Image: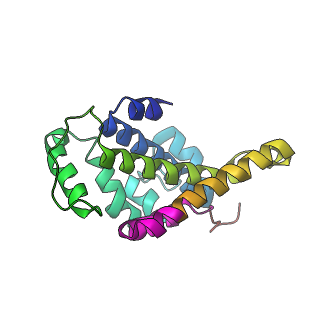
Amino acid sequence: MLCSNLFEAGNYTDALKCCRTMLETLVKLKFFYKESTSLSPYLKTDKNISGKFIKIRKFFENSAPNVYEKNYDFLCRFVHKGFATCLPSLVSRLKSKSNGFEKQSSFLPVPSFSQLLAEVVLKHLLFIILGYLNAAPFFLSREILLNEEVKIKYEKLKAFLENVIKENKLNFPNSAEWCQLMEELISEPVVLMAH
């Protein structure tokens, strides 16, 4: 809800901070699905069963190795100090890579409407939500999906998000590589170890 409120108010950088947090949680969910024996020690100490601290990079390496450097690092820039001074540069870079922007328009200070930053937030949200939907049956009681009404709504929402992402890849070929990268992350969890 917070991310939605920030987005609607035009606070795109703060909304991207929320996207980063949601992405971290999704990656951790997928990690612990694969390595369930590390969950209890981690919740108590931030360490795995061997007593080693689990760094966020390890979570990504386990679920979607390329996402850490190519996307998570980008989102981190919105969290760490000093990034706000780089926003005009970011908007300029985003505009120069977008179709139809032959000359860059002037930077609008946040929280003013910025189509490009709004698109970045929306694309992240679409993928992250789909990632959670793909993970839900593995982490929530499967009985939830036995309720026919819930199952229908769940399937419709998944199909809608998958269609939006598919159309985005077709209509904006420049984002196809990023979409493919994120698809690795949002896929259903895969078991590596026996539970």
- What residue is drawn where x is 44% and y is 47%? 122
- What residue is drawn where x is 47% and y is 44%? 22
Q: Whole-percent x and y of residue 12?
A: 33, 38
Regarding residue 65, the answer to whether it shows in the image is no
Horizontal side of residue 7 vs 73, given as left or right: right
Q: Which corner quadrant holds the C terminus?
A: bottom right
Give the color scheme: rainbow, by chain, secondary structure or one colour.
Answer: rainbow
Q: Quadrant of residue 71?
A: bottom left
Closer to us: 44 or 28 = 28
Q: How many labels does the image show?
A: 0
Closer to us: 178 or 80 = 178
Q: Is residue 169 above or below residue 75?
A: below
Q: In this view, does 173 lie above or below 15?
A: below
Q: Whole-percent x and y of residue 38?
A: 56, 53
Q: In which quarter of the image is residue 78?
A: top left
- The residues colored magenta run 167-188
Q: Is residue 180 magenta?
A: yes
Horizontal side of residue 106 vs 23, given as left or right: left
- What residue is drawn where x is 41% and y is 51%? 53
- What residue is drawn where x is 40% and y is 62%? 67
Q: Whole-percent x and y of residue 5?
A: 44, 29
Closer to us: 111 or 50 = 111
Horizontal side of residue 184 vs 16, given as left or right: right
Regarding residue 39, the answer to whether it shows in the image is yes
Magenta span main SS: helix
Q: Is residue 177 magenta?
A: yes
